Amino acid sequence: MLAKRREGPDLEFSEWTSIGYLIAAALFIFGLKKLGHPRTAPRGNQLGAMGMLVAVITTILDMQLAEADAEWTLIIAGLVIGSSIGYWMAVKVEMTGMPELVALFNGFGGAASALVALSETWRYIEGTALPTGLQLTVTMVAAGLSALVGWMTLSGSLLAMLKLKGGIEIFGKWIKTPTWGPSWLNGVKVLLIIAAFALIYYGIDNPTDKNVVYALIGVSSLLGILLVLPIGGADMPVVVSLLNSLSGIAAAFTGFIINNSVLIVAGSLVGASGLILTFIMCKAMNRTLPDVLFKAFGGSGEKQSLTRTKVGSDADEVAMMLDGAQKVIIVPGYGMAVSQCQHQVKEFADLIAEKYDTEVSYAIHPVAGRMPG
């Protein structure tokens, strides 16, 4: 652990901490509200980032005022390294690579929650601050669920990232990510889920058994891989959205473990919004979530050869078609994502709307339109 929990906190310190966490939670909620519309989405991102900054500063000040025994070098190093990696990825990754980046960030979120749960569990294994009675049961259940969802999210997100990318290059050889899911694999998934809950139940009576921790990590990671392995094609956006929801749920469970209210609020917001988005996307495809997870419909590992005729046009031809057009529908696709010409498209739409009084609208697929291309 980076810091020891203080016993009997001063009321004044506790009040300031609660106020800081309340402000952070409010920023998260308002940020999520702003994300509901394209025009206010950038502001929503900013509010969410501010909320996270307030939460981090509040936690650090709380530790400082409480004179906690903290490894400040590790804390500062973690903040600097994590922020640098996140900024570098956001700047470096192309727009067409955003789906893979989102999947990777989902995995990182699940891993962070799982590692916090592992840290708390390891304290109990070493015999430090081992709770008793109902507190032990609640803590071990929360830690077990956080580990289950967190490691499952990490392994599933990494596989989802490779599927979206198409494969991985190893020693100069491109290896395609497989899509494989026979019907009997569903039974294996159910058995793994039962095994995970059995391990959590066993861990309540044996909180110092290291083998339970190792087994739960293995079962959860394997479950994440098997859940994503049969899925591909048009179902991948749904999987990424579901993994995003799971990363939030893992964070909420972690908040119960370390008694952190802002983590519970933030995790619940991410989990609920991600799950709602997942159901909306499933409805848009006329499918249910169980169908996506347990029926191999989204793609296959077989190669298909297609012959297509390229249809081209030039600016003059497009201008002639638009001259006198009463209604124009713009379909954003892969080309716009690659060229990053969204601002030019908006200027073009405003131009023909003002000059020719043309009605301009956009045709965005409810599922595929959420991912570039």
Image (spheres, rainbow, N blue to C red):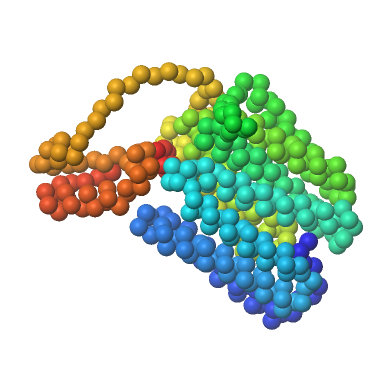
Residue 269 visible to the viewer: no
Question: Eyeballing the image, is 250 above or below 164?
Answer: below
Residue 322 shown left or right of residue 165 in the figure: left
Which x, y percent locates residue 14?
69, 76
Residue 167 visible to the viewer: yes
Residue 307 shown left or right of residue 23 in the figure: left
Q: Residue at x 17, y 42 (%)?
A: 327
Which x, y percent locates residue 266?
58, 59
Q: Nearer the viewer, residue 182 or 318?
A: 318
Which x, y percent locates residue 141?
76, 49
Residue 44 shown left or right of residue 110 in the figure: left
Q: Residue furthest right?
A: 127
Question: Eyeballing the image, is 246 above or below 321?
Answer: below
* Residue 77: quarter of image: bottom right
Q: Residue at x 45, y 46 (%)?
A: 94
Q: Residue at x 86, y 46 (%)?
A: 210
Residue 324 shown left or right of residue 144 in the figure: left
Q: Nearer the viewer, residue 20 or 328?
A: 328
* Residue 68: quarter of image: bottom right
Q: Nearer the viewer, residue 314 or 253?
A: 314
